[in-house]
Image (cartoon, coloured by chain):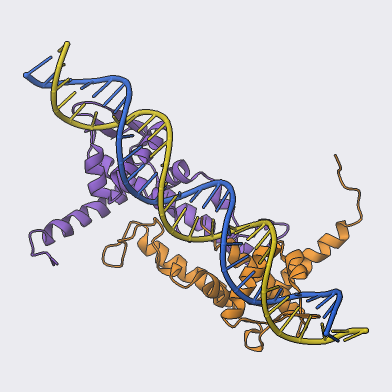
Chain colours: A purple, B orange, C blue, D yellow
Amino acid sequence: MMHLSQTTGYAILALGCLEEAGGKWVRVAELAASTGAPRAYLVKLLHRLAKSGLIRTKRGYRGGYTLSQSSASIPLLAITEAVDGNEWPTQCLLGYTACTDKEACPAHAFWVQERIKIQEELARLTLKDVVKFERGRRRRKSRSAGQPEVSA
Amino acid sequence: MMHLSQTTGYAILALGCLEEAGGKWVRVAELAASTGAPRAYLVKLLHRLAKSGLIRTKRGYRGGYTLSQSSASIPLLAITEAVDGNEWPTQCLLGYTACTDKEACPAHAFWVQERIKIQEELARLTLKDVVKFERGRRRRKSRSAGQPEVSA
DNA sequence: ATCTTTCTTGACCCGGCGGTAAACAAAAGG
DNA sequence: CCTTTTGTTTACCGCCGGGTCAAGAAAGAT
């Protein structure tokens, strides 16, 4: 509750990874490793992203996934809409279905403003920002690699 | 997604209704009618609210539910915590589990601020505000009552 | 005592999201 | 051609939030 769906998170991270790869084809295995999403689940998600036109796919030897040109540096908002749909920006904070401008719940005016801000932020952030984040993660990971694991 | 749980909405409306009733005992039937929540489901919710100390219950003839004195005009935040738990204010917007201050996702700084604002708003709003909202609803309802229904 | 009212309690259902498994099909290498 | 690589497709699983049902137990009226 109070966050985008986990699936959207996976999508953003995976697309960020594709952006970073330039035009190269990237396999699921790599995307799964890089995003932390379960491989089999990522497959389904990638398929949806392909159907909605955000990425292209190629199967067989040296196949994989790549960003479709049109989605280079798209804003995160476009991704949340592709994955979660675009109905959420109208929902009442309290989950109250009859909450409208005319019949406003106590948090209505406040929430209308907040939703706008959240959408603006998601529109402002692009895959490039995600790439920066992922590079940071990978650096930290490799820096701590090779150290003794806490084994049972 | 992107709102408190529906159950929390029910809780807020129901508690508002109890606040409005003063010290009187209110039956489920009335709370269900007034909140729009399914009666059987409301029963379970009310039980939880009773166990967490927000309301008192009395069964048998002229029984029902009433606000426990201590919860008169409590802030909505207390209700969301009682119903949804209080873990949500720490979750990443993108649903990314490893997102922390040290390992921040691209939306982290933004979302930390927004969460604070949302909590402040929920702390500011009290049951009295909800009562005002409910009175407005009831007025509108009764004003439109008695008019010809669109029947098949 | 007994009846009525009203909450109590426990069992169950349904749909969606996140997740898994396995058979299938295409693209390239040999 | 045949094999390898890699995505495609279909089916199924478990959990949880929201929702329903029905038998049980207490409190007041009579």
Q: Can you see residue B115?
A: yes
Please indicate whether residue A107 sits to the left or right of residue B60 in the image: left
Q: Nearer the viewer, residue A49 or B54?
A: B54
Quarter of the image for residue B87 reads: bottom left
Q: Residue at x 37, y 58 (%)?
A: B107
Farthest residue to the bottom: give it: B69
Q: Nearer the viewer, residue A96 or B123?
A: A96
Q: Residue at x 46, y 65 (%)?
A: B114
The x, y position of residue B128, in whole percent, is: 69, 77
Quarter of the image for residue B101 reads: bottom left
Q: Nearer the viewer, residue B10 or B135?
A: B10
Q: Can you see residue A105?
A: no
Q: Quadrant of the C terminus of chain B?
A: top right
Q: Nearer the viewer, residue B46 or B76?
A: B46
In the image, residue A63 sits, relative to residue B99, either above or below, namely: above
Q: Residue at x 80, y 80 (%)?
A: B61
Q: Residue at x 86, y 43 (%)?
A: B150
The x, y position of residue A27, in whole percent, is: 23, 36
In the image, residue B78 sits, relative to residue A80, either above or below, namely: below
The x, y position of residue C13, in whole percent, is: 59, 51
Please indicate whether residue A81 sits to the left or right of residue A149 in the image: right
